[in-house]
Image: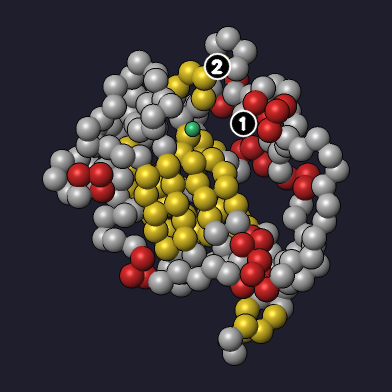
Amino acid sequence: MSGTLIPRDRTAHPEPYDPGYKTSVVRSPRNALLSLDATVTENTGPTFGHDLIGPLDNNLILNFTQGKAPAVGERIRMHGRVIDETGRAVPNTLVEIWQANAGGRYRHIRDTYFAPLDPNFGGCGRTLTDDEGYYEFLTIRPGAYPWPNRGNDWRPMHIHVSVFGSGFGQRLITQMYFQGDPLIDLCPIAHTVKDRGQLDSLVAPLDMAGSRPMDYLAYKFDIVLRGRRQTMFENRPEGL
Ligand SMILES: [Fe+2]
């Protein structure tokens, strides 16, 4: 891709076809990919206004009941910065998360796992990064859950994350894991990331300094998007 984005580092991302993760076999492309140039849409959109976000949108403990009753589970704060690979903050960008409840069950019609739904937990949240690229969520720690793959595979505790970035071409969808979870090393999905350093970057360390005594533990998760080259947009400098 030419345009204003720095080419994606393909070695850092999972291959679409990875037989250990069985559904990737049917989901992955059969033909060679075509490379298309970025257009204005990929380079500049989307932009988000603060009126898009409600006051409880980044609080998954309370947002499903609109503050009436808290969700069951270990209370945690997930927080960090969104930066690009040149170290520059990505401000005012939409960060969305979704996750299973404390028992490992999603509020989704196709999730039929035995663990019960929590009537006070929806499992989705969103927020915008501030001027320094900082974001935070309050939520509960999701449970591990089994999935049909090779007979007895379990997903480690994880939170799904989508970040839009300054342009659609920067969009990243990933997962955050938790420090010390032994299931990370057994998970075929986690191990579609072949580079150990890259996989470790998806594991959020416990952050006692960011926790609140008698309330919640914190996990720090910084998110790095691909970089943008120098360009001018709407009369303000963007890029390097
Ligand atoms: Fe999941």
Alpha-carbon distance for marks 2 and 1? 15 Å
Q: Quadrant of the N terminus?
A: bottom right
- Residue at the disc numbered 1: 190
Q: Position of residue 156 (x, y in %)?
A: 50, 26
Q: Mark 2, mark 1: which one is toward the viewer? A: 2
Residue 225: percent from the left, percent from the top? 63, 58
Q: Residue at x 51, y 25 (%)?
A: 155
Q: Is residue 22 visible?
A: yes
Residue depicted at 52% across the width and 19% down the height? 147
Q: Secondary structure at mark 1?
A: helix
In the visual, does 135 lie left or right of 173?
Answer: left
Q: Residues within 10 Å of mark 2 (few under 14, many from 20)?
A: few
Provide residue 197's location: percent of width, then percent of height. 68, 40
- Establish if 131 lies above or below 7: below
What colouring method underlies this structural image? secondary structure
Q: Badge 1: how crowded within 10 Å, few (<14), some, or many (20+)?
A: many
Which corner quadrant holds the C terminus? bottom right
Amino acid tagged 2 = Pro
